[in-house]
Amino acid sequence: NMYQLKDVFVLPLTEGNRCSYVESIATSKQPPMWMISHWWGTPFSHTIRMLQLQAQSRSCQGAEDMIYWCCTMANNQHDLTELEDADVLRSPFARAMLSPSCVGTVLLC
């Protein structure tokens, strides 16, 4: 699940620069096509499968053709103070959803 992914994968890989996972691997900006809304307790393999099905339903070859905004990967898990802003429209979630490149939100249940 995302709790384990964060602890075992994201945090150790980003510890050196104390940045988000996306910041640590991306070579350019990653404008989101879809913002993911999900429960962190869902098994990660189920999350990936649901995203693959969503991508297929949008007539794409697979999830690798899409740019999904996922908080676990996009937010700096070492410093979440950005989430404390009283103005919800300045949150990373709102910025992703309101981005000109964002088609919509994918709700994973």
Image: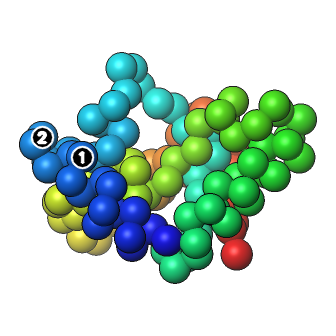
Whether residue 102 can be seen here: no
**Foreground of the two, 40 or 99:** 40
Quadrant holding the C terminus? bottom right
- Position of 106 compared to 96: left or right? right
Specify the amino acid type for callout 2: Asn
- In the rendered image, residue 8, in percent from the top left (x then y), is placed at 30, 62
Give the label, 2 or 1, closer to the camera. Answer: 1
- In the rendered image, residue 81, in percent from the top left (x then y), is placed at 18, 64
Q: Residue at x 39, y 73 (%)?
A: 3
- In the rendered image, residue 86, in percent from the top left (x then y), is placed at 28, 71
Mark carried by residue 13: 1
Mark carried by residue 17: 2
Above or below 100: residue 4: below
- In the rendered image, residue 30, in percent from the top left (x then y), is placed at 47, 30
Q: Residue at x 85, y 43 (%)?
A: 56
Q: Quadrant of residue 16?
A: top left
Q: Residue at x 17, y 59 (%)?
A: 78
Q: CA distance from mark 2 to mark 1?
A: 9 Å
Check disc 1 and report its element: helix, strand or loop.
helix
Specify the amino acid type for callout 1: Leu
Check disc 2 and report its element: helix, strand or loop.
loop
**Foreground of the two, 9 or 99:** 9
